Amino acid sequence: MAEQNRTALKEVVSVTYITKDNAKFEKSSDFIKMTATLPNEEGVAEEKTWDRIFLHRAFPFDFPFAYISVLDADTKELGMISSVDDFDEETASLLRAELERKYYTPVIKKILSVKDKFGYSYWKVETEEGEIEFTMRDTFSNLLKVSGTRIFASDIDGNRYEIPDIEALDHKSFKKIELFL
Amino acid sequence: MENRKTLTARVRQLAPELKEEDILLPVDFNLTPTAKKRRTDGIALLTKDRILVFADGEKTGDIPLSELEEVALRKGIGCCFLEYRKKDGSWHILCRADNQYVDLYAAAAKEISRFLEGGEISYDYEKEIDNRCPICHRQYRPGSNVCEHCVDKKHYIKRLWDISKSSHHLIYLSIAFYFVIAAINLVPPYINRILVDDYIKAAEMPKLAGYLAVIAAMFGVYILQKLLGMTRSIFLIRASNRITVTLRELVFDKIQKMSIARISKRTSGELMNRVSNDTGELSRFISNDLGAMTEQILILLAVSIYLFSYDWRLALMIILPTPIVISSYRLFHSFMRHVFHRGWQLDSRENSILHDTFSGIRVVKAFGMEKREISRFDKVSRDLRDTRILTEHFFAKIQPFLNFLMSVGEYFLLYYVGNKIIGGTMTLGEMSQFSAYVSIIYGPLRWLSWLPRRLTRTMTSIVKIFDVVDESVDIADKTDAIDHRIDGTITLDNVSFGYDKTSTVLKHISVEIKPGEMIGIVGKSGVGKSTLINLVMRMYDVTEGAIRIDGIDIRDISQDSLRSQIGVVLQETFLFSGTIYDNIAYAKPTATRDEVITAAKIAGAHGFIMKLPNAYNTKVGERGHTLSGGERQRVAIARALLHDPRILILDEATAALDTETEKQIQDALQKLTADRTTLAIAHRLSTLRNANRILVLDKGELAEIGTHDELMRKQGIYYGLVMAQRQMSRMPSKKQARPAS
């Protein structure tokens, strides 16, 4: 009895890692299918197939492709992937594509205009994907400075935009955003 | 996001074979469903027998409805998906769009799924499009249909004017005073001229009486000027204070009436800003800037008219340097804005570090992080110092130069006027009058160059104030809401609830609670227990179904009447600054001292209160810091009991107490709760041993209900929870036993 209790405790605190040795990912229609040998609720390893798994970043700003949580369709965590790069190239690119699809974050190349009006700011930017206009509320706190020069902006709808290196922006763009930093 | 009409037109261009009535529900999308990142321009639509997808002008999908089971929304990060499940159980992506579409897709998914089950399309989903300003497509504030981006500023100014009705006479009076003062301002230079021409440089010996009269006039004008200015200021300050108080009351009143859902969308700091800073800003504008603006403009006009009518070439010469000065001010300004902004930011960062470290001082000390905090603070302090020095240096260097530039006109004047005097076409007195006017005119000019920024700032405050004031009350009493004396039956009839449109926290909960029953609510954290009791208190309105008390829908009962009969002890016990007595008597200010003591006794608070030197008169510090967690909780229980509520709600009310004290309070409560309906949430299941029935929530649904014994026999979720807790409480002894075994 005592022995069992200890095992159960260990199960609660330990992290299940999903690696190239215990799991296989493949594309299945629009989603990713996973076949993996993972400990079940009793802690016994068991092979199972999930038709649809979802990925969630543990450190979305710091590690976009590492520390990835693998979730089932009910958003229950099945395990963690230490790094997408640990898998073979094909699997890695599959996982990467899924992550990039879920986390839609256009990269801002140029700030065309910023208008600050009545507590809202109205942005017009050039991204890799063309011109985008968006509105930010409470601009100062919604411009998230991740590292010294990397910035994430979230607009009123919850969309995100990234500026990978604020110092690499052209002078005019930099001047426009500087006031809010 | 486009509406049905334009989308239908676009679809008919892409697929001319479709008739208008075939297109049941079109939605557009702007991201490609599968590729990494790319914007696209697409439409997905429901027809009578299939779902079609068009992307960038081409048909990319065609799913017959016979294969379709349901359509659902899935949220990504910064984007959302519409997905469908086929009859074979497989899931597929229909389309993907950025987050703007999330509410629209949630509503559309519901409608399509309902349609698949044989229902009708109600076009309710279109509300999510109407939710946006047709001009700029930005979402309106919740509850409003005014787009603050596109709204006419005049609208707000007019509203403000209407609100300040009681002060209109004061404002009119002060404006009248401004005219008089502006006129009087023109007098001293005129007297000065008389003084110079007729007395100082007079050809013959002037009369002493006249001379004295001129001096007296000057003195009189000066006194008059000051007196009028004083009266005017008093009027304006009175007006601005009245308006500010009206606005503050308006805003505070509104915030008090807002539902928890609305209030929790804003931080308390933000709300405080609305009430104090924004109204303060407005008050400053009315009492200082509005007055100054009128005055300066009037002076400018009066002096300009005089100067131009006297000699237009001279006037031009004086005004000539102004544009240069104003533009250099502007230049200087945009730089200053940067520096000021930086200073302001560092200032607020310094404040937040101070706030953080002081309120978290225990943690700092416990982890031995004093050095790190010191260096963090030092760095910000030093940065702030450097910025301040930069600002001051800049000011010191630039200001005199700008002032000099401003007065360059006076040198032109000297030259021109000097020539005239030598030529004999102008007297010395006239010159002195003229240069006095010149120095008067520069003041307003300089002042007006700062005006646009002040106006923007004030306008922003006005808009923010009305932003709060205009917010619709989402949980409002019906006009025919009744006051009901609660007996205690609570009926939940198929209740579903979600905090936003895309999520459901509680699903189809039906239960009837009899008067006087004590119901325990258990379930994992985040399962919706607190949400459920919030719904009973009507902090939120149910999304579907109804909650009835004694058979009356709680939406038909006035909120005052409802809440005055519910006593609540919440998870986070909040004590107001004031004495312990004040806190207990909060909900019933008319309570006698005896009642307060009785309530405290039942709550097990009397004992520790009497140990305090000031007993019931002890002041509880900020958030009740002088009391321990358990003590605070007992004060909160006393507060809820004093109210003599018909329904008692305990949300983890005794969680911070030791089991012994808890038991005492429980037993006292039991006598009390005998004829009161009680809802109690507890993680510690022993707390619920007096409960008549236990309600087990799981994944937002009512999983089990019954007495403790019934549920134990059932060996379901509740049984599991009880067993887990028993194991937990046994754990420490097992652990200790381990080395021996």
Image: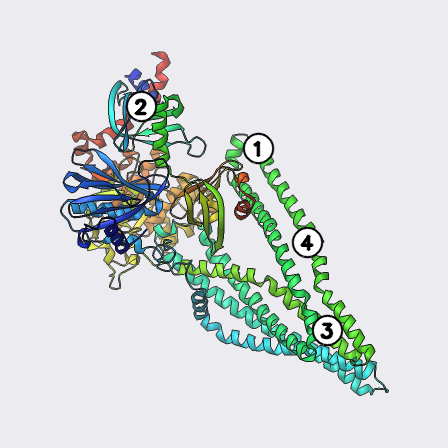
Q: Is residue B40 visible?
A: yes
Mark 4–mark 2 Cα distance, whole angstroms, equals 72 Å
Distance Cα–Cα, label 3 vs label 1: 60 Å
Tell me the subunit letter for badge 1: B
B114 sits to left or right of B740: left
Discs 3, 1: same chain: yes
Could you confirm whether marks 2 and 3 are on the same chain?
A: yes
Residue A99 vs residue B219, the one in the foreground = A99
Q: Chain of mark 4?
A: B
According to the picture, the residue beneath numbered tag 3 turns out to be: B436
Q: CA distance from mark 1 to mark 2?
A: 41 Å
Q: Which of pointers 1 and 2 lies earlier in the amino acid sequence?
A: 1
Secondary structure beneath dot 3 equals: helix
Categorize mark 4 by other alpha carbons within 10 Å: few (<14), some (14-19), many (20+). some
Amino acid residing under circle 1 = Arg
Q: Residue B665: image x %, image y %?
A: 32, 40
Q: Chain of mark 3?
A: B
Q: Secondary structure at mark 4?
A: helix
For the residues carrying marks 3 and 1, which lies nearer the camera in this image?
A: 3
- x, y percent for residue A4: 29, 17
Q: Which mark is residue B730?
A: 2
Q: Which residue is under mark 4?
A: B395
Q: Which sits in the foreground, B238 or B190?
A: B190
Badge 3 or badge 4: first in the primary sequence: 4
- Both on one chain, marks 4 and 1? yes
Q: Amino acid at mark 3?
A: Ala
Image quadrant where residue B674 sits: top left
Which badge, 3 or 1, is on the more N-terminal residue?
1
User: Can you tell which mark lies on residue B372?
Assistant: 1
**Disc nearest the viewer among 2 and 3:** 3
